[in-house]
Amino acid sequence: MLEITVSQEQGSVPVTVIHLHGKMDGSNFNDLIAAATKAYQGGARHILLDLAGLEYMSSAGLVSIHTITRLLKGESTESMDGWSSLRAIDQERGGGKQRLVKLLNPQAKIAKTLEMSGFQQMFEIHTDLAGAVASFS
């Protein structure tokens, strides 16, 4: 089960914080995409994913994070299935850290998944909320 809550923080720009609690897998990763899409449609342009309460994340969770990144960049997300998304992630890995989606406080198991997938090369990972919010510009 995945519980998603959303809050707002103000740094030099408004930051939407999406807090995740529980387990994210193929049965619920679209819930995160839906929450981010709703926030985007409401004007969010900087998203911080708070992973502190996330106990487990399958590759479907990686797909959801990548899809959110594409959404905020204004790229199409409609035709992305899991496999094409994972291939796109592999291609984008060398492009440096992107600036619109950042990650906060992943637990050790989640951090290992992010490391093994190359997401640490693509995303800034922060350990405190204030520093993460301040990093957006």
Image: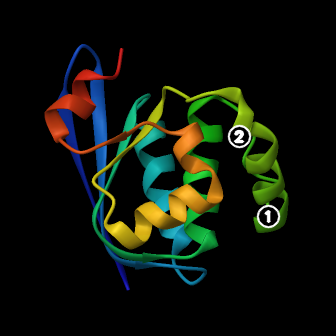
Any mark on residue 93, and which?
2
* Residue 86 vertical position relative to residue 36 in the rendered view, above or below: below
**Quarter in which the C terminus is drawn:** top left
User: Front-most of 107 and 22?
Assistant: 107
Quarter of the image with the N terminus is: bottom left
Mark 2 secondary-structure assignment = helix
Identify the image quadrant of residue 87: bottom right
Q: What residue type is labelled 2?
A: Arg
Q: Where is residue 98 in the image (x, y as percent from the top left)?
A: 56, 29
Q: Which residue is drawn at 63% across and 51% down?
A: 118
Residue displayed at 53% across by 66% down? 113
Report the residue marked by disc 1: 81
The CA distance from mark 1 to mark 2 is 18 Å
Seen from the viewer's position, the closer of residues 43 and 20 is 20
Q: Is mark 1 on a helix, strand or loop?
A: loop
Q: Which mark is residue 90?
A: none
Q: Residues within 10 Å of mark 1 (few under 14, many from 20)?
A: few
Label 2 packing within 10 angstroms: few (<14), some (14-19), many (20+): some
Question: Which mark's residue is nearer the viewer, 1 or 2?
Answer: 2
Q: Residue 50 or 76: which is nearer the viewer?
A: 50
* Dots 1, 2 in contact, CB < 8 A: no
Where residue 102 appears, x then y in whole percent?
41, 39
State the count of labels: 2
Amino acid type at image mark 1: Asp
Tag 2 or tag 1, which sits nearer the N-term? Answer: 1
Q: In this view, does 52 lie to the left or right of 78?
A: left
Residue drawn where x is 57% and y is 49% of the image: 119
Q: Which residue appears at 60% of the width and 61% of the height?
A: 116
Tell me residue 77's x, y (percent): 72, 47
